[in-house]
Amino acid sequence: LLMGAIEDWNDLEKEYTQLEEDHKNYCELLSRLSAAQQKCLSQIAHHRYRIKCILDLLNRASKAPHGEEERKQIADLKMKIADRKINFHEMEDNLPHKNGLYLRIILGQVNVSLLTKEAKFIYKKDYETFKLTVSYIILALAFLSGFLVSSRWCDAVLNFLLVWYYCTLTIRESILRVNGSRIKGWWLTHHFISTVCAAISLIWPDGYTYSMFRYQHILFVIYLSFVYVLQYYYQSGCLYRLRSLGESHEMDITVEGFMSWMWKGLSFLLPFLYFGYFFQLYNAYVLFQLSQHPLCEEWQVLALSAIHLTLFLGNVSTTSLVVVNKVRS
Amino acid sequence: LLMGAIEDWNDLEKEYTQLEEDHKNYCELLSRLSAAQQKCLSQIAHHRYRIKCILDLLNRASKAPHGEEERKQIADLKMKIADRKINFHEMEDNLPHKNGLYLRIILGQVNVSLLTKEAKFIYKKDYETFKLTVSYIILALAFLSGFLVSSRWCDAVLNFLLVWYYCTLTIRESILRVNGSRIKGWWLTHHFISTVCAAISLIWPDGYTYSMFRYQHILFVIYLSFVYVLQYYYQSGCLYRLRSLGESHEMDITVEGFMSWMWKGLSFLLPFLYFGYFFQLYNAYVLFQLSQHPLCEEWQVLALSAIHLTLFLGNVSTTSLVVVNKVRS
Ligand SMILES: CC(C)(COP(=O)(O)OP(=O)(O)OC[C@H]1O[C@@H](n2cnc3c(N)ncnc32)[C@H](O)[C@@H]1OP(=O)(O)O)[C@@H](O)C(=O)NCCC(=O)NCCS
Ligand SMILES: CC(C)(COP(=O)(O)OP(=O)(O)OC[C@H]1O[C@@H](n2cnc3c(N)ncnc32)[C@H](O)[C@@H]1OP(=O)(O)O)[C@@H](O)C(=O)NCCC(=O)NCCS
């Protein structure tokens, strides 16, 4: 036995020198990579600066009197510059990105860049699955708290979960944005405000107003989770289709296919979304009425009413704008 | 003007081909790096597996009867294996690490590895500064809420801040741990429990018990923030000294210097820490008394009492263990 162990060890020893070699090689690559990264980043910054100067010149030139020929040249150069900027964006996809303020506060200076398309796709998919899973849990808890256990304790757990969920969403969405997702700023703000909203519901003391609104609140949470589930099927459908679009090369056919799928999905989803938004408006109205009630002493009621109104306004305008833009293009 | 702009552009165009070259070079390095990474990781896993097999053999061998010579060989091989394991740990310092469950839930599959010593140091320093800054803010808010504005609203903001702070700490500390910090598990658990503790204080309804404990709670928060500030000076002192230790080469002198500095710091800090722990025990006692009071209806009181007791027990035993281990070595 002992001889066997010693022999194995000696074999392994030989392989170990190979591993050491590989590791040294890897460390060298790592330092070369960060040098190359730095170089690319500083060059892009330099180019950006130079281009800004050229644009300044062009703007001044286009103010001075000039002939047909010159106008064509200016327009031409501006086109080239716009193209170049797109190129820079594409290059930056593979370069590490700076964290925004929010991520810097929560996570610190850690690098959360996803440098390949594949990594980005996996991360986004993971984000959607996360939303789906937590939505189901919230749905279950809200049912429990609405129809089976009507104790303040159960409500507190539900509201805690909501606070945690929206908070986590803002973190993950900030990471997505750092990595080039085009999530509208409003949805991020929406999740910030929803965190505050859930937190205020959490500290709303038990009493007349709370018991008056409790049932409606739980119904709203149930409806919202249901909409999130629907949204999941739409968003993850888009994601998969966009990915296979990116991979395949028979562009024309697939883009059309994607568009028609997207419109079908959207026209199914939108009525539910708008119903949810008007539910929010209705919440704001009911809460406002409650806040005028003589028995109402809590500041939470008016605050929640204002928050629901804000959410309604932001959601309706953003979603409508997105849809209008989609119709146009 | 226009001619100038066009000339500049043409210059820049030349530089751009260089940038494109560099970027292609960078992308190639990136893919080579991830291949090398994969190779090292899988080789280490393979070695680990083989070593486990050898250890099994050795254990069986040491059970069988054997002479002096053999015993020496076994001990020798075991030593070598232990050394090898340390080598693996060192190699892994430069390799990406898998996120733990908590980070996977909060952040998803994003890679938060810090691959160089320098990056690790900066991250740790940033973490300490974060703690210091937020401690000062908490201190200010607690003073405000304790001595100037005694409204439930101000308490709520303070407790919110505490929830957020501890929550963020757990995230950052998980990142530190992924990157090889030896923070004891208890401190992480401590911050989890503290999050829950602050959250329960947040939803504690206003009433007899709340007003009885309010003042003591705020005093405790003030004391804790004060201790955090002291701790900052100790921890960041350790950090800087450890770093210069790692860089300099006159090992002996500096290690001794470090040890004597550390002991001085510790013996200054420890009385404050233990006072804080006994404050926690006292909190647990007062809360327990309150929970027995006929006017007490809230479950929060007993829950908080249990939490403070747990924190006291965990803190005292962990800190004492750490100190005892330091004395021994
Ligand atoms: C209206 C809607 C269906 C349009 O979705 P879409 O077709 O993906 O919209 P866009 O083309 O503007 O998407 C741009 C990016 O933002 C993301 N995105 C859009 N809405 C998002 C949302 N609500 N949350 C997170 N990400 C979102 C998309 O996934 C896409 O990401 P990518 O750049 O990584 O591919 C979508 O915005 C939506 O579901 N909004 C409703 C959200 C809501 O109201 N929630 C509360 C319910 S009452
Ligand atoms: C007792 C104490 C001073 C010892 O500190 P230390 O000398 O750094 O202890 P260790 O050698 O065990 O440290 C190991 C690692 O854990 C870190 N660490 C130790 N205690 C920590 C804490 N409370 N929070 C975060 N990190 C901590 C150290 O920075 C070190 O990190 P590194 O591996 O990245 O270098 C420290 O643990 C401490 O301050 N504890 C008190 C915390 C507390 O009780 N807070 C509540 C106040 S009532």
Image: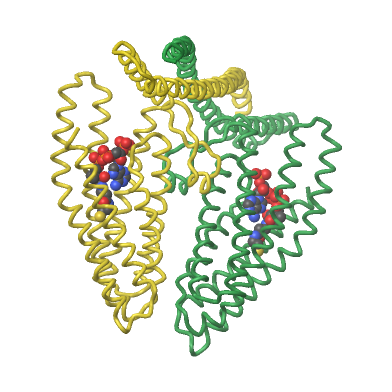
Chain colours: A yellow, B green
Residue A280: quarter of image: bottom left
Can residue B62 be seen here?
A: yes
Q: Is residue B197 left or right of residue B229?
A: left
Residue B274: quarter of image: bottom right
Residue B2 vs residue A79, the one in the foreground: B2
Residue B289, relative to residue A315: is it above or below?
A: below
Number of dots carrying numbers: 0
Rendering coords of residue A288 (x, y %): 28, 72
- The quadrant of the picture occupied by the N terminus of chain A is top right
Residue at left offset 26%, top offset 69%: A146
Residue A156, relative to residue A138: is it above or below?
A: below
Can residue B318 be seen here?
A: no
Q: Is residue A329 left or right of residue A55?
A: left
Rendering coords of residue A37 (x, y %): 52, 23
Residue at left offset 17%, top offset 53%: A272
| Residue that sits furthest to the front in the current view | A65
Rendering coords of residue B309 (x, y %): 59, 71
Q: Is residue B328 left or right of residue B202?
A: right
Residue at left offset 32%, top offset 39%: A125
Residue A329 vs residue B296, the one in the foreground: A329
Residue at left offset 81%, top offset 40%: B255
Q: Is residue B59 left or right of residue A297?
A: right
Residue A14: quarter of image: top right
| Residue that sits furthest to the right in the current view | B253
Residue B94, relative to residue A234: is it above or below?
A: above
- The quadrant of the picture occupied by the C terminus of chain A is top left
Q: Specify the quarter for ligand 1.
A: top left
Rendering coords of residue A305 (x, y %): 31, 67
